[in-house]
């Protein structure tokens, strides 16, 4: 199998995703991503002539409910139940820190 992705590209993608990959893990992930790309190339070989485009595989249409705040009158009870609050909002831990302080 010819390589479709290089270790440098895997490093770049890992950096974009803020993932740390050890040098000894790099060949493993490069092979895995190479195989995934190969699967997509295999799918592109499937003959889809005459197949109608599909946006949904079910016959259900618009099954979502209206976005209505139903608990607004219980706001304080909800906040009292949260582990940490500030200024009327629930505080949650930072997941993505783009400040650069933790690099």
Image: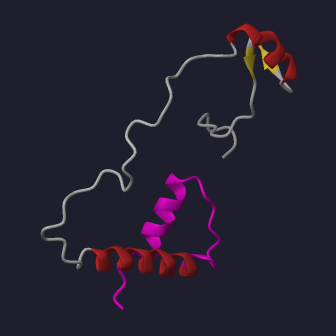
Q: Residue at x 37, y 84 (%)?
A: 3
Nearer to me, 43 or 35: 43
Q: Residue at x 58, y 53 (%)?
A: 18
In magenta stretch: residue 21: yes
Q: Is residue 58 above or below residue 102?
A: below
Q: Is residue 9 above or below residue 80?
A: below
Report whether 94 appears left or right of 52: right
Report whether 49 appears left or right of 20: left
In magenta stretch: residue 15: yes
Q: What colouring does the structure picture have?
A: secondary structure
Q: For the view shown, which residue lies furthest in the front direction? A: 59
Q: Residue at x 41, y 75 (%)?
A: 6
Q: Is residue 52 above or below residue 7?
A: above
x%, y% of residue 103? Answer: 66, 46
Give the position of the N terminus as an image quadrant: bottom left
x%, y% of residue 51? Answer: 18, 66
Residue 53 visible, this orientation: yes
Nearer to me, 73 or 38: 73
Q: For the view shown, which residue lies furthest in the bottom direction? A: 1
Nearer to me, 37 or 14: 37
Report whether 102 appears left or right of 13: right
Give, as a single range, the part of the protein colored magenta. 1-26
Q: Residue at x 18, y 77 (%)?
A: 47
Say which quarter of the image contains residue 57.
bottom left
Say which quarter of the image contains residue 90.
top right
x%, y% of residue 84? Answer: 84, 23
Number of marks in the rendered image: 0
Say which quarter of the image contains residue 70.
top right
Residue 87 visible, this orientation: no
């Amino acid at each position: 199998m010819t390589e479709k992705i290089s270790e440098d590209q895997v490093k770049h993608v890992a950096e974009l995703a803020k993932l740390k990959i050890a040098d000894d893990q790099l060949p493993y992930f490069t092979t895995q991503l190479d195989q995934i790309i190969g699967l997509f190339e295999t799918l592109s070989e499937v003959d889809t002539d005459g197949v109608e485009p599909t946006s949904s595989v079910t016959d259900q249409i618009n099954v979502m409910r209206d976005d209505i705040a139903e608990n607004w009158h219980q706001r304080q009870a909800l906040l009292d139940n949260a582990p940490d609050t500030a200024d009327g909002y629930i505080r949650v831990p930072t997941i993505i820190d783009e400040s650069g302080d933790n690099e």
